[in-house]
Image (tube, rainbow, N blue to C red):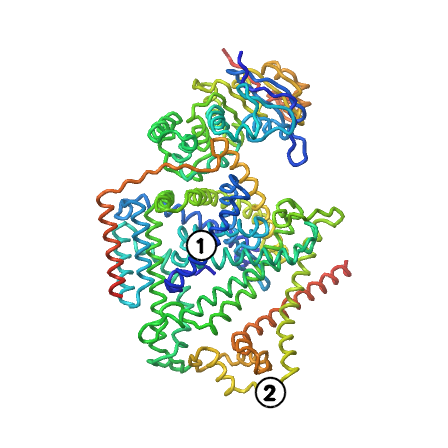
Amino acid sequence: MPEKTRRRHKNFIEKTIVGLAEVAEQALYAESLAKADGLLQKLDARVKVIGLFSLIVAAALSKKITIILSLFGLAIVLALLSKISPVVLGKRIWLSAFLFTGAIALPAIFITPGEVIYRLPVLHWAITAQGLRSALYLISRVETSATFAALLVFTTLWTQVLKALRTLGVPVVFVVILGMTHRYIFLMLQTAREMFESRQSRVAGTLPAKESRRLAAASVGVLLSKSFYLSNEVYQAMQSRGFRGEVYLLDEFQMQKRDWLALAGFLSLAILAFVLG
Amino acid sequence: MAVAFGVQNVTFRYNDIIALDDISLTLEAGKRYAVLGANGSGKSTMLRLLDGLYFADSGTVTAFGEALTEERFADDDFAYSFRQRVAFVFQNPDVQLFNPTVFDEIAFAPLQLRWEKQCIRSRVAEMLDLMEIAHLKDRSPHRLSGGEKKRVALASVLVLEPQVLLLDEPTAALDPKSQSQVIDFLIDWAGSAKTIITATHDLDIIEDIADECLIFQRGKLVAEGKPQTILRNETLLRQTNLIHAHRHAHAGGEIHSHPHLHHDHTHDE
Amino acid sequence: MHIPDGYLSPSTCAALYAAAAPFWYVALQKVKRLLSTRLVPLLSVFAAFSFIIMMFNLPLPGGTTGHATGAAIAAIVLGSWGSILAISVALLIQALFFGDGGITAFGANCFNIAIAASLIAHFVYRLAAGSSPLNSSRRIFAAGLAGYLSINLSALITAIEFGIQPIFFKDATGAPLYAPYSLAVAIPAMMIGHITFAGFAEAIITAGVVAYLQRTEPSLLKMTAPDAVIDSSLPVTQSGWQATRSLWLGLALLMILTPLGLLAAGTAWGEWGAEDFTNPETRQQIEQASSNQAAPENPPAGLERLSTFWTAPIPDYAPSFLKSEPLGYILSAMFGVGLIILASLVISILTRAKRVSDA
């Protein structure tokens, strides 16, 4: 089959491989940012979890677009201070959120009842003030929350996030499961990629639909069987090293003065936003 | 001569397939054993019975004089004592590296055995230096190479200073350099674990890592002996599927096929 | 659909966290009792598995692709409680680590995708499969149906959560603060995509994996069918995929017959003619059904007409939601898609017959 045809019909195998690769890449990238020498990186993980979460809640509660946008501005400032470039945030977070939520919000501009402020030239569709406000609320909230969440993930190693959750009251069993899940996601990513890549090398052009579906279901089935096998082996490995039902962890956190200051800062900003908005 | 493990008329079924068929053997403390056999011979299963991960359907497995049963392991003191004394290194390191970082992995075993925290921290630091993986301590397991994973896996069990080391196919799926590192490690290991039992089908290494060999086939123990003796017994090796015959060339240009091992060589001394 | 932050008001989010909590608690107790120490490795691995599944692009009719959540297959293999926990863990990692789904909306996402879908899938599967043998094709059908219905129920609940936002949460000028669409718009908008693409994706995966497991490892299906046996007289392998064909047929018939059924019920009582399709009355209907929102200047006229085709004949004393626009849209979509599936089935049967006769 000529090269051109093959590239045009991107089959589902390719799409899946690309998707899986993106996950691995995102994880690696987050890890590299978390090791940079920036403001948020230096803070205790618990402070970041509580602080950024309270700012997300503040953005959710606010009834004024100006307040939400100020919080967004705060997020950008924090990003810059943590050596995270807005370009990166734009490519990875803002753009896709804007396109997705923008597409959802667009019809609202026209169909929300209220004071008409403009009519489109040819179609005579009316844009209402309330429609615009509603769309702005939605988009700004989505972007602001997504940015704060990204700040947490990009400046904190995953293991630190888990430990923070642990000391903030999440039961140990969940924290252990979360950690183990995260670790095995990467193993499965690799297995899934290998499965699909080996299939891909034997496929020229597109697969007929029925064949594709069979492949998809079989891949899922194979992964499922491997999952059970893997979990049995992991269970034995855990038992072999003394696991008997309860997991014990090493708590390593110590708050420093700057952590307390940061915590106070986050909380007061969140409360301020709440009071003002 | 203290007996480390005793196995008497043990049968074990796995999903209605007989994995071990009326096996009896004795393993002495302080000796190094190689359990040989092709895939499916039961050698992995035997190791897991020795580590109290599976329990025999009939017959008894004893360790340090005590019978290994599920009820026995329900007792905290026995369980902790056994888990500290016997270490198992799995064939696939991914199975054994289930913690978020290398540091957490090495700390896992002592934490589960309720050691004191400061003691754990210093012991983990020791192991990191000993295995030369200190630079990896914050790394996630999926970002380690095969050889590094193996070293972390070893560290994570040796941290307890066990008396017995069980290894399931330690050289499988490793590149040659990592393989030789593992072998060297086992040869030089002057640590506490004096009893080492390795399940393998890699005949190249048994002379270096074992004093005694046990050969399994289809769930039965078919032969015992010193490595040198076993290696010379071509018939036995071929019957138990431990060596193969395929066409190959010799230096003189001759091409033929006969059973062989791949490590025959001479030194010019 | 994974709901991002900002679409649901904080009170809605809090309410859904509160709704999810008892399910999480019960699930943990039940799973602990059932699995005890195996719980940690089994759930972790399974959560990783469902995370990966959510990323698979699945080939669908018409050359499109879609995503499945894997909640139904998780419920069939692990049972509903195990599935609730495993999917919740996967969702948490998606939200925290990959920004897929919001943090304040996490409770809502778990309620919709992990909890509701798992429970419904399990229920439908057990009901439809009955006590048939583990390797019977009836189970494959039951699995596909469970997948299809569970994801659509998820979508419906999500749509309702969206739809009630503008009712309760507006600012001083009357602009909606969160999701801006009323029930009349949100429900059809969400459902059309799920009745079709997402529903098929989930049905394919659930049925296909059960078929695969019947061949390779039927013991994995035992947890939700403890009394079922393996009937060794049943033909193996190919019967799996023949059964999915009957699944498609079943779905197609469901989608065609429901609207037709409603139509028939209507004509038994009402007298209607073409004049029911003209604009003035239906414009009024739209406004009424859409919480008095002003109708757009240029409604999608064709769709509008089609939708009242199904709902206009419904007698006046029927509950108002049966006469509403949204239901009409949904029924139109169902009928259309049902026709498409039926057509492709017929074509594939015909072409196969032709190929056989050519050979």
Residue in front for this viewpoint, B258 or A211: A211
Screen quadrant of the N terminus of chain A: bottom right
Mark sitting on residue B82: none
At which x and y percent is residue C153?
A: 54, 63
Q: Pointer 1 indicates a residue of which chain?
A: C
Residue C169 lies left or right of residue C230; in this view the side is left
Residue B88, given in percent of the width and then of the height, sits at: 50, 28
The answer to whether any part of residue B256 appears in the image is no
User: Which residue is nearer to you in this view: A71 or A13?
Assistant: A71
From where the camera sits, is residue C274 visible? Answer: yes
| x and y percentages locating residue C154 in the rendered image | 51, 62
Label 1 sits on what residue type? Ala
Q: On the picture, is B64 further left or further right than C248?
A: left
* Camera-side residue of A205 and B211: B211
Q: Looking at the image, tell me whether mark 2 or mark 1 is earlier in sequence order.
A: 1
The answer to the question of whether label 2 and label 1 lie on touching residues, with beta carbons closer than 8 A, is no
Element under disc 2: helix
Q: Which residue is mark 2?
A: C274
Residue ID for mark 1: C21
Q: Amino acid at mark 2?
A: Ala
Residue at mark 2: chain:
C
Against A7, is B84 above or below?
above
> In the rendering, at what x and y percent does residue C98 appear?
41, 52
Q: Is residue A179 left or right of residue B40?
A: left
